[in-house]
Amino acid sequence: MKNFIKVILVLSTVISGSAAAEQVNVYSARKEALINPLLNKFTQQTGISVNLVTGKADTLITRLRSEGKYSPADLLISTDVGRLYRAKQQDLTQAVDSEVLNTNIASNYMDPDKHWFALTLRARPLMYAPDRLNATELLRIEDLTDEKWRGRICVRSSSNIYNQSMVAALIEQIGEEATEAWVAGLVKNFARPPKGGDRDQIKAVAAGQCDIAIANTYYLAGMLTDKDQSIREVAEKVKVLWPNQDDRGTHVNISGAAVSKYAPNKEAAIKLLEYMVQQEPQKWYAQTNHEYPLRDGVQWSKVLTSFGQFKAEQVALGKVGELNGLAVKLMDRAGWK
Amino acid sequence: MPVSDKRVFSLGNWTDPWGWGVSLTSSILAIPVLLILGSFLFPQISLWQHLADTVLSDYLSNSLILAFGVGLGTLFIGTTLAWIITRYDFFGRGKLQWLVLLPMAMPAYIIAYTYTGLLDFAGPLQTWLRATFSWSYGDYWFPEIRSLGGAVAMLSLVLYPYVYMLARTAFSEQSTTLSEVSRSLGVSPSKHFFKVALPLARPAILTGTSLAMMEAFADYGTVQYFGVSTFTTGIFRTWFGLGNGMAAAQLAAVLTSFVLLLLLLEKHSRRKIQYYHQGQKHQATPREKLYGSKALLALILCALPMILGFILPIGQLLYWAFKTAEEGIDKQFFALVWNSFYLAALAAIIAVSLALLFAYAKRLRSGRILQVQVQIASLGYAIPGTVIAVGVMLPLSGLDMALNGVSERWFDVSIGLVFSGTLFALLLAYSVRFLAVALHNVDAGLSRIKPSMDQAARSLGMTPIKVLKHVHVPLLRASVISAGLLVFVDVLKELPATLILRPFNFNTLAVRTFELASDERLADASLSAVAIVAVGLLPVILLTRVLDLPPPEWSESQGFGNRYQ
């Protein structure tokens, strides 16, 4: 009888899909379209099949936590550092010591305890209308609080993680007080209450509603390579400006991944992580979604090349995750919607 | 609430299994909502202090304005349409009576995307205006679509069919003699509308309005995109941004209490009157024929909400979709369509079955506890899908843990996540979220069946089962079908809970649309958006057929007396 029940249980396990041949289960905050092609290639090369659930990072983390030690998830992929930090804080990840990862990823782009690793870099510079503004007028993001930009800046809501990480990174580098003053000055110069996404800010600059936008580069790059000519024309009216090139560098966030604490397929998960930092996937992100590769020698897309080289912030990204809550409170106080 | 009469169906006392079954089911469904309400046991004082100092007043006022704005908007559009279409005959009426339901198939966040594309500062209309009159920014005034007012407009345009549907049924069931009496007493048509027809239809209209308001309270997609801070955006900001899940749950609990208040108000408004079907022989009300400019006015009035809520946005979507169709339609795409369809169908069947169970339980028993349990379970409608999803995830994961613990200890096998990692979790979440829709419809249908009919049938020697079969089923059919179709359309459009709870390698049209749209790739998202609308149209058209059927029940119920003597 006991054996019979055991057979049933094993069968149900197979059906619910948590113990088949070699496979790896991924919880991904990266959208399906921007991960599946790579996962398919990984399966082709290694024979390891990949199961995928996409979603928002925080809800995936919540799911991971509530599933506890029976969670099928092996790898958590996030599009920003704050969530990876949070997963580690909640004791949901584990350290990975891999030669491949250690040599290919700069130390400030991984967790000090090696719980999470960057997979690509995403820069958040300024974008401006060259017909209404001279790039030499604006060298640092600190300049954005100047009175002459009153009513000329567009940026999306502070609910957005990219803005939260940007402010958190600033707190780490120039201190809480200076950052709070900067945020307050920035909000004063908004052309309109924040709305829409990064592309909307770029469009608003092109249409003349504002002169400066803060946005991630891959949005502009995506518009510049859109099939729709009218979108390309809009994007061509806007130029990238790399702020803080003479001091700390431009703000950069990451997409990254961590192996979950109870990963049932830990080895396969590490293989997938190692695969993601290889030349080919790195090139795929640089070409397809115009994100910056982690390693040198990976060919950038044409559009990325046209934006030019830049110096990136060197802040330890773990700190950025830690300061996220403080950044939100500070933006709340400044009235950044 | 229907008057319960225990003599009609006697199912024993509280110890019978049926009663326990109902009670257990409603308790399970109430767990997610109770978990959220229970968050107040862990006060987060400093965080609430911060919220109160900064953003709380915005959340409060915006959420209330949004819900009441949408309430008024849907009330006005839905009732006007229903009245014109039931009382007047004019060119195009036959088609319009179902065309006006089309916006129901349009998810609110999608209509928001398309209108922003059209009306935004950088959109074609304003660009054209600037080019034509050589204006630039600041030279002219144009209504800002991405605002609180814009959100009210968007939600009203897609939610008015809820009011229209219920109001139309109510108006068309009002007996002809009522308007004849009004006329013979010299009461003007408008006075008849306000003094007789409207008050009689009030429960139905208020039910529709409160459903629309609950949707508005729970809306996340639209307000998030429009940059309007409401309770729902605040919940996510507190949870994700400030990293405080407990305070987020408390915000959700406050939102839930608004809805509780709303439901109590609705109940209070009809406390003294039991609205039952009159029971006279139904006569098709002759519609007043309109000609000339009056007919044109009626046509325009009825067509306008449908054009704005459906034709314009679907036109924009189709324009985008044609550009991307070639690469968008593949085998995977049809898998998405199928997944969306069967998930929605399954959820609809479950929700309606539950609603029938509870509606009858409430009718047959006056048990206070049961009433409260059902009420709590149906609060889920106003809670954002994400919050419900977490409320479902926690207990199911706990259950899975316990099961695995047992199976490991006794059989040395771990069985995996059989509840939380499968479609079961998703279907439970849908049941909690959409029970209210089904229950409102079924309740409304059931409340029109007078208890005296049951008594009459019983006294004529019918068994309870026969009463069910020959009296209730034919009378309830329309309500049950519309309940099922409404849930179907709602689940089809549902996003957040689907996103969080779905198993590995399982996607739906809504998930695909969201992923592309949230990457600001609206054109690429349009194909799956059109597919949602197309799949959603099917039940909407079915729904119109149900609404269109002349109530056949009366001839049948008149006949049964003879048959069963």
Image (tube, rainbow, N blue to C red):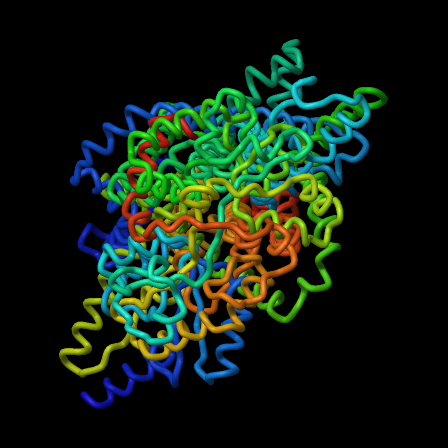
Q: B303 above or below B324?
A: above
Residue A3 or residue B54, whichever sits in front: B54
Residue B481 or residue B393, whichever sits in front: B393
Residue at 44 percent across and 82 percent down: it is A48
Where on the picture, by quarter, is residue A169? top left
Horizontal arrangement in the rendering, residue A253 relative to residue B166 (left or right): left
* Horizontal and vertical percent position of residue B502: 42, 62
* Horizontal and vertical percent position of residue A221: 62, 51
Q: B42 above or below A134?
A: below
Where on the picture, by quarter, is residue A27? bottom left
The quadrant of the picture occupied by the N terminus of chain B is top left
Residue B289 or residue B405, whichever sits in front: B405
Horizontal arrangement in the rendering, residue B426 relative to residue B560 (left or right): left
Residue at 45 percent across and 28 percent down: it is A186
Residue at 38 percent across and 67 percent down: it is B422
Q: Is residue B4 visible?
A: no
User: Residue lying furthest top in this view?
Assistant: B186
Residue at 75 percent across and 34 percent down: it is B93
Number of numbered discs visible in the structure rendering: 0
Horizontal arrangement in the rendering, residue B118 relative to residue B227 (left or right): right
Horizontal arrangement in the rendering, residue B36 relative to residue B352 (left or right): left
Residue A330 or residue B452, whichever sits in front: A330
User: Residue lying furthest left in this view?
Assistant: B409
* Horizontal and vertical percent position of residue B272: 37, 23
* Horizontal and vertical percent position of residue A89: 24, 55
User: Residue lying furthest right in this view?
Assistant: B292
Where on the picture, by quarter, is residue A237? top right
User: Residue lying furthest front in this view?
Assistant: A246
Q: Is residue A8 visible?
A: yes
